[in-house]
Image: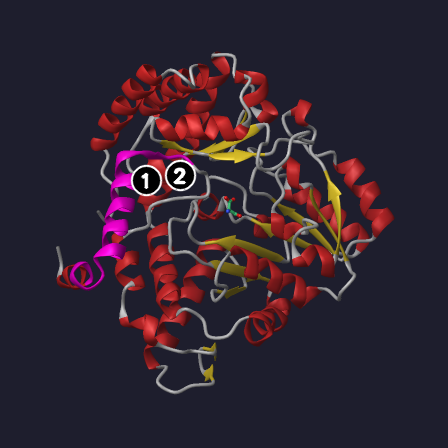
Amino acid sequence: MDAYRRQLATFDPAIYSEIEGEERRQGDGVEMIPSENYTYPEVLAALGSVLTNKYSEGYPGRRYYGGQQHTDAIEQLARERACALFRAEHANVQPLSGSPMNQAVYFACLKPGDTVLAMDLSHGGHLTHGAPVSHMGKVFNFVRYKTETARAGAIDFDQLMTLAKEVRPKIVLAGYSSYPRDYDYASFRKVADEVGALAMADIAHIGGLVAAGVMRNPLDAGFDVVTTTTHKSLRGPRGGMILCKKDLAKVIDSAVFPGLQGGPHMNNVAGTAITLKKAAEPAFRVYAEQVLKNARVLAENLTNAGVTLVTGGTDNHMLVIDTVSSFDLDGRAAEEALDRIGITTNKQVIPDDPRPPLRPSGIRLGTPACTTRGMKEADMAALAGWILRALRNPNDTASTEKTRAEVKTLCRSYPVPGL
Ligand code: DSN
């Protein structure tokens, strides 16, 4: 145990024992929530550094407080690395997380009441894409488009064009948090051009896969602005980034600070810079390719066993299982059954779900975290077997205990980075 941990354990044993418990939980189980990952030990070191003590309102070279010689250098490196990695003209690395990054783009580019064309929540869109319960949904006018679930989740771009001509959006938004496919960004760009809208992509989930070059980059299709979180497939600290064209740089930066946020969390910005350096290494591409392979193998094993996947499969890191039609279990019961065997997933609405969000018809699974631990195709086949066993026999205590032990044994072969 290092000196800081010993000090914490002595001063606040209650908190320390919960941290230890969470370390055990993360190590003994398989994390399959598609938005989660294990960050690098180097990032953990930056997060726990003295950078957390520093206020740095403003941007490199233009701060409102003194003492910025080191923070300026760190933020500048993070911005340059982000631009190089994603082929962006400008990067803002200050958003505290995914929601504020999207809010900043809306406030930078829209007036209250303006229209945004975004993916329907139940088809995979995100809360910050204007769900009625979000504040953004009250400030701006979000109009929804849907996917064609029977055609592998395809988007009908003729229909989208007709809708865009009708509602005249200021932003056409391509983005999701529960959609297991890739997008045809050029077709979105065409729709945006036709109605004079900005093309925005929210790649929060797939930022790492785009950075590695294993999924399409919307900036290559001429998108104006792209947002991504840093803690999902990118494997960094919790945070957000906005990548945009030069002509939007000023309004985006002002919308983040002073528009929406105060001082950036410089320990996070340093963690982001380190993450971006890691993501530029060849090993990260190998990791990203394995994330996709693992998701496909998991999907194949489940569909071969008769499980219904939303859109029929996956092109990215995630799978959405219709648990009601596959196992006669709602999403909450399925999530709980998997929790009991040490596989963590999350309940999830499926397209046009007739059930409520806390008892939806499905669950969502992803491979970024288990791939970080080193799991490969054979492990995915084993995981698929255990998932099937647990969801077919959710109330069989003996089977649950046996499966839990098998999951734990697998986990012992794959230590969590940083532990
Ligand atoms: N919570 C993240 C997710 O799970 O997709 C984004 O909201």
Label 2 CB-ligand 1 distance < 8 A: no
Residue pointed to by mark 1? 372
Q: Is residue 360 above or below residue 44?
A: above
**Mark on residue 142?**
none
Q: Nearer the viewer, residue 280 or 73?
A: 73
Find numbered disc 1 in the image and state the secondary structure of the residue it sits on.
helix
Q: Residue furthest right?
A: 166
Label 1 CB-ligand 1 distance < 8 A: no
Q: Residues within 10 Å of mark 1 (few under 14, many from 20)?
A: many
Residues drawn in magenta: 8-32
Residue 288 location in percent, x, y?
A: 40, 39
* Quarter in which the N terminus is drawn: bottom left
Q: Is residue 57 visible?
A: yes
Residue 72 location in percent, x, y?
A: 39, 77
Q: Residues within 10 Å of mark 2 (few under 14, many from 20)?
A: many
Q: Amino acid at mark 2?
A: Pro
Find numbered disc 2 in the image and state the secondary structure of the residue it sits on.
helix
Q: Amino acid at mark 1?
A: Thr
**Residue depicted at 48% across the width and 53% down the height:** 229
Q: Is residue 198 visible?
A: no
Find out whether the residues at labels 2 and 1 contact each other: C-beta distance under 8 Å. yes
Residue pointed to by mark 2? 368
**Residue depicted at 44% across the width and 33% down the height:** 292
Q: Is residue 356 left or right of residue 93?
A: right
Residue 44 location in percent, x, y?
A: 28, 57
